[in-house]
């Protein structure tokens, strides 16, 4: 996600190119402008006449605006739900770690015990595994730094790495309950924390693997393309040499809205306007390590070239 700085400058946003839809649609706009220029030239020298009327374009534009509005609202709902799920993940990780530090016995010196530290590291492993899974990345080296060697090797055999980490955490709960280190009440409560983590994972996977229906996307793209390329044929009779300018303005609006809907449809990707999953993961890691009393924690991830990963 881009870092626009605070406070946001209106002029800076107006003239900003990086992260805008213009980058994605520049060649489409170029094609529309070229067709407009050629058509305007041919019309003005009397070699071509266009029967398309402004009324037809108006009706088509009205329908297209409704379609684009619905599609972009749907895409933003997916984006916002993804951010809400990762906000829930932050809260659940903190709450679960706090429960571990409260319920389980600490070490002799008052610091966190091995089981508290090991289970907290598994939480971190789950967070990083979920991020990598959503972005189709593989970094087993990071898992080896957070899990025991045999656990990391066993988890790597699973096709769903986050779920494999949850299984490790649940197995630890079973051992703690069987040895009497936690009561039945706390065993149920900790199980609920794992269920909350599983719900977050399931919600993210639902968004990631359930795109907007392909037939609907094809229809939107086709109508937008038809409309913007038909614009000069309906405007040249009344606007003459001003046709390319007006066509570019209208085409930028519709092509831009179409591109924005495409970009935010999958909020877990690595586009400039997608969610900063790496930054959120690092925040969770810093919080949990500090809860363990660690001082040698990784620094927060700031923007690199104005971009949060």
Image (cartoon, grey):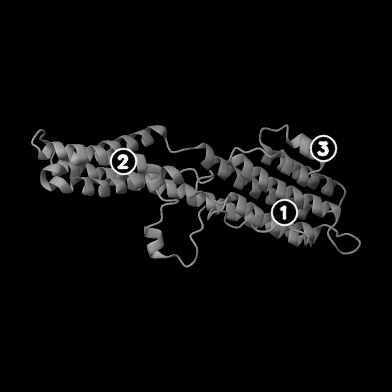
Q: How many marks?
A: 3
In contact (CB < 8 Å): disc 3 and disc 2: no
Quadrant assignment, res 42 = top left
Distance CA(mark 3)–CA(mark 2): 56 Å
Q: Which is nearer the N-term, disc 3 or disc 2?
A: 2
Q: Classify mark 2: helix, strand or loop.
A: helix
Which of pointers 1 and 3 indicates the residue nearer the eye?
A: 3
Q: Which is nearer the N-term, disc 1 or disc 2?
A: 2
Measured from the top left, where is residue 296 in percent x and y?
77, 59
The circle on residue 189 is 1
Residue 196 to residue 101: above or below: above
Mark 2 closeness class: few <14, some 14–19, many ≥20 residues within 10 Å = few
Measured from the top left, where is residue 301 in percent x and y?
63, 56
> Which residue in the protein does label 3 denote?
150
| Residue found at x 76% / y 47% | 146
| Residue found at x 60% / y 47% | 200
241, 154: nearer the viewer: 241
Mark 3 closeness class: few <14, some 14–19, many ≥20 residues within 10 Å = few
Distance CA(mark 1)–CA(mark 3): 27 Å
Measured from the top left, where is residue 140 in percent x and y?
72, 39
Query: Residue furthest toward the right?
Result: 108
| Residue found at x 79% / y 47% | 173
């Amino acid at each position: 996600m881009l870092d626009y700085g605070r406070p946001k400058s209106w002029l800076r946003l107006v003239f900003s190119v990086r992260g805008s839809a213009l980058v994605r649609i520049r060649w489409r706009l170029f094609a529309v402008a070229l067709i407009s220029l050629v058509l305007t030239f041919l019309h003005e020298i009397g070699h071509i006449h266009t029967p398309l009327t402004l009324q037809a374009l108006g009706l088509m534009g009205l329908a297209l605006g409704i379609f684009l509005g619905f599609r972009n609202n749907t895409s933003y709902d997916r984006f916002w739900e993804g951010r809400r799920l990762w906000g829930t993940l932050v809260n659940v990780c903190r709450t679960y770690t706090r429960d571990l530090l409260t319920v389980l016995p600490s070490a002799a010196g008052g610091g966190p015990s091995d089981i508290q530290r090991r289970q907290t590291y598994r939480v971190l492993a789950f967070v990083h595994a979920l991020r990598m899974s959503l972005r189709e990345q593989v970094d087993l080296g990071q898992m080896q730094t957070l899990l025991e060697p045999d656990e990391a090797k066993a988890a790597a055999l699973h096709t769903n790495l986050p779920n494999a980490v949850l299984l490790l955490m649940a197995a630890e709960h079973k051992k703690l309950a069987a040895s009497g280190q936690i009561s039945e009440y706390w065993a149920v409560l900790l199980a609920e924390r794992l269920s909350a983590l599983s719900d977050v994972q399931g919600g993210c996977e639902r968004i990631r693997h359930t795109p907007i229906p392909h037939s609907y996307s094809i229809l939107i793209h086709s109508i937008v393309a038809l409309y913007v390329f038909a614009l000069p044929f309906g405007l040249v009779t009344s606007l003459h040499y001003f046709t390319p300018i007006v066509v570019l303005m209208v085409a930028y609006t519709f092509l831009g809205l179409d591109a924005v809907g495409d970009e935010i449809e999958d909020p877990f990707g690595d586009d400039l306007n997608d969610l900063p999953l790496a930054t959120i993961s690092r925040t969770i890691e810093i919080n949990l390590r500090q809860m363990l009393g660690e001082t040698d924690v990784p620094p927060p991830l700031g923007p690199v070239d104005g971009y949060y990963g």
